[in-house]
Image (cartoon, rainbow, N blue to C red):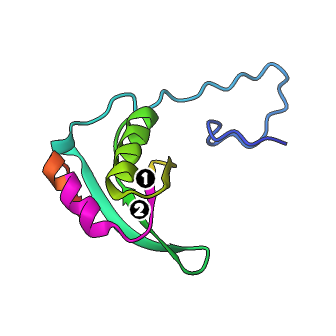
Amino acid sequence: MTKNKNLLGVVYSTNPDFGYEAEPDSNATTLQPAKQNLKLLLEKRNGSKLVTVVKGFVGTEDDLEKLAKQLKNHCGSGGTAKDGEAVIQGDHSAKIFNWLTNLGYRTKK
């Protein structure tokens, strides 16, 4: 059984001709850096490993992946971009905070 995240609110339908119409994607455009409100968090993953999480990015998945790639290159660390947030391995909160504010993002720790 596969789960489809686009089928919000539909539990079950007995109609064989049922065609679910997904809502249009609200993240069609990326906001300018000055209008973004990003939050930096430190989280523990897998017991003792620290990661720096950038939450609150409003934009397309491609732009989020580009931002995550730039952050990984700046920090010299690994990471990923998924579920609307960029996850960078290690405690790089100060470095990421300074880098994002220099680019014009509004950032909170």
- Locate the N terminus and report the quarter of the image it occupies: top right
| Image: magenta residue range | 86-100
Determine whether 26 is above or below 104 in the image: above
Residue behind mark 1 = 86
Residue behind mark 2 = 53
Question: What residue appears at the point 58 percent right and 28 percent down from the top-left corner?
Answer: 22
Callout 2–callout 1 Cβ contact below 8 Å:
yes
Question: What residue appears at the point 21 percent right and 55 percent down from the top-left corner?
Answer: 99
Determine whether 5 is above or below 90 in the image: above
- The kind of residue on which mark 1 rests is Ala
For this rendering, which residue is in front, 1 or 53?
Answer: 53
Q: Is residue 65 visible?
A: yes
For this rendering, which residue is in front, 25 or 63?
Answer: 63
Q: Residue 11's x, y, as percent? A: 74, 43
**Which image quadrant for residue 77?**
bottom left
Q: Residue 21's x, y, as percent? A: 61, 24
Question: What residue appears at the point 40 percent right and 41 percent down from the top-left corner?
Answer: 64
- The kind of residue on which mark 2 rests is Val
Name the residue furthest bottom.
48
Q: Is residue 109 visible?
A: no
For this rendering, which residue is in front, 5 or 76?
Answer: 76
